[in-house]
Amino acid sequence: MVYTEIKNKRDTLVLGFPRNAADMQIKLSSIGIHKNVKDIPLSAQESDDIRVRLYAENNIWNHFVRIFSGTESLADVNEAVWAILKADEVIKTELEQNIIHDQYDSVQELLKDIEGMTVSAGKYTESFYFPLKGMLDEDEYEDYYEIDNMFLQEYKHDIREAVEREQSIGDMAQYFNRSESVNEKLASAVWSVDEVGGNLYGRVNVRLKEPLTEGETEILKEWISGQNSDGLGEGFEQRAIETEEGDLYVSFWNSGDGYFVYSQDEMDAYLRQQHEMRMGGM
């Protein structure tokens, strides 16, 4: 296990990793720290207002601690520990040996290697799709109005980059808490956008240790919808994406009857139905 000792003036807090990001923020606030965990560096200088010391209790985690130079944040530690613990059993032996023999010079190198080994190990992957809603704020008129999907497609690269930045705190799989069986199988969940069937959709790429049952798939879809409305998506839709026409705001969720979260098979069926309806109307 990896621990951190955090001192804020006379108050001291000891936390073990990994842990839910929201719970970490609550624990930090108990000693008067209200900074985001990604803004708290691993520095223990006497001149620092907040002093953070990282330590471990066994061999592999002691070597893991050595990877951090002191410029990384608490969020970086949490993400890296999650990545190691969530790693597939197929790659764990090699990963542990790499850590013990100090093969990684940075946490970025560690995470990249885990990702590469995971892909090579042939993990199960699934994708889930949902519609996007865009609102444009034209400064000239100081008014918001909904824009069509063609506009979203024009700025798909900007939207994709913004979604990546929103997930900088770490893999979204760490926030899953709906089902123990799904949690044991869920290794990674990454939000993005993708152009499918002539429209831009939100897409969640999921990596799994084992295939999900039908019931587990529905639980995961409900969680994705919840993240879209009240979690990741709630914060994302409040952050402007600059365009030549004005500030663009993109929502992952809407209250309309046409909203959905579809698996790949469901999305394929939906697109076929949409195509048939268009052909029938010609």
Image (spheres, rainbow, N blue to C red):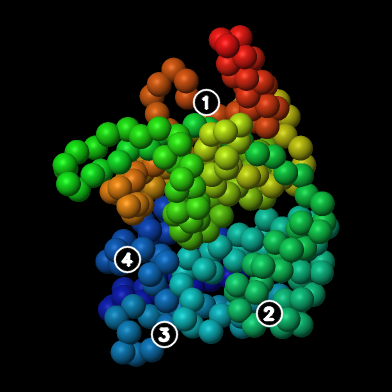
| Amino acid type, callout 3 | Ala
Which of the marked residues, 2 or 3, is nearer the chain's N terminus? 3
- Tell me the residue that label 3 is attached to: 44
- Tell me the residue that label 4 is attached to: 35
Give the secondary structure at mark 2: loop
Q: Which one is in front, 75 or 194?
A: 194
Question: Mark 2 touching mark 3, by CB under 8 A?
Answer: no
Q: Residue lying farthest bottom?
A: 46
Q: What residue is shown at x 73% (from left), y 29% (from top)?
A: 213
| Amino acid type, callout 2 | Tyr
| Amino acid type, callout 1 | Phe
Other residues around mark 4 within 10 Å, as few (<14) / some (14–19) / many (≥20): few
Q: What residue is shown at x 82% (from left), y 66% (from top)?
A: 93
Q: Nearer the viewer, mark 2 or mark 4?
A: 2
- Tell me the residue that label 1 is attached to: 260
| Image: 88 above or below 100 | above
